[in-house]
Image (tube, rainbow, N blue to C red):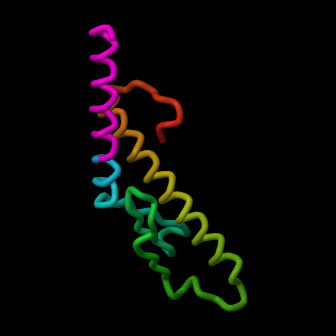
């Protein structure tokens, strides 16, 4: 095995270790998102687990549940987007900005 290939393999193993550490760290980082002007708030961690949902009582209307459902979906989707963006930024730090297809 050539020395250059050995170095590449070593670097790949180090990157793999850093990525595993990052995934663990992401569980401790949070993002917050809201919809309806703050009527629905979502808190999510970097592993895209919803930690809390807060709903303003004023938006709860038995006659218009569809609006509430839409607000919740919008807030969750925004939280997911923010979480993915946070992960992408953290990954850039590990990979030096190199885009690695299929990584995340």
Q: Residue at the location (35% across, 50% down)?
A: 23
Magenta stretch prevailing secondary structure: helix
State the image coordinates of residue 38 (x, y, percent, origin top left). 47, 70
For the N terminus, the image quarter is: top left
Residue 70: image x %, image y %?
Answer: 65, 70
Percent x, y for residue 94? 30, 33
Query: Residue, x 53% and y 36% (percent of image)?
Result: 102
- Asked if residue 88 is among those painted magenta in the image, a careful observer would answer no
Whether residue 96 is situated above or below residue 33 in the rendered picture = above
Residue placed farthest to the front in the image? 1
Q: Quadrant of residue 71?
A: bottom right
Q: Residue 74, located in which quarter of the rendered image?
A: bottom right
Residue lying furthest bottom: 62
Residue 7 sits inside the magenta stretch? yes
Residue occupying image coordinates x 48% and y 41%: 104
Q: Going by the image, does 54 lie left or right of 91?
A: right
Picture quadrant of residue 14: top left
- Determine whether 98 is above or below 76 in the image: above
Q: Which residues are magenta?
A: 1-20
Q: Is residue 80 left or right of residue 31?
A: right
- Depth check: 101 or 76 in front? 101
Please give left or right for residue 101 compared with residue 95 in the image.
right
Name the spot of residue 13 as percent of width and height, x first.
31, 31
């Amino acid at each position: 095995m050539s020395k250059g290939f050995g170095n590449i393999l070593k670097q790949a193993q180090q990157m793999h270790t850093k990525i595993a550490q990052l995934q663990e760290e992401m569980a401790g980082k949070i993002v917050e998102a809201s919809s309806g002007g703050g009527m629905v708030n979502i808190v999510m961690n970097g592993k895209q687990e919803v930690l809390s949902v807060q709903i303003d009582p004023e938006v709860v209307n038995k006659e218009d549940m569809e609006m509430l459902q839409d607000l919740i979906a919008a807030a969750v989707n925004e939280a997911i987007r923010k979480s993915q963006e946070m992960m992408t930024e953290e990954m850039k730090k590990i990979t030096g900005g190199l885009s690695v297809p299929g990584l995340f």
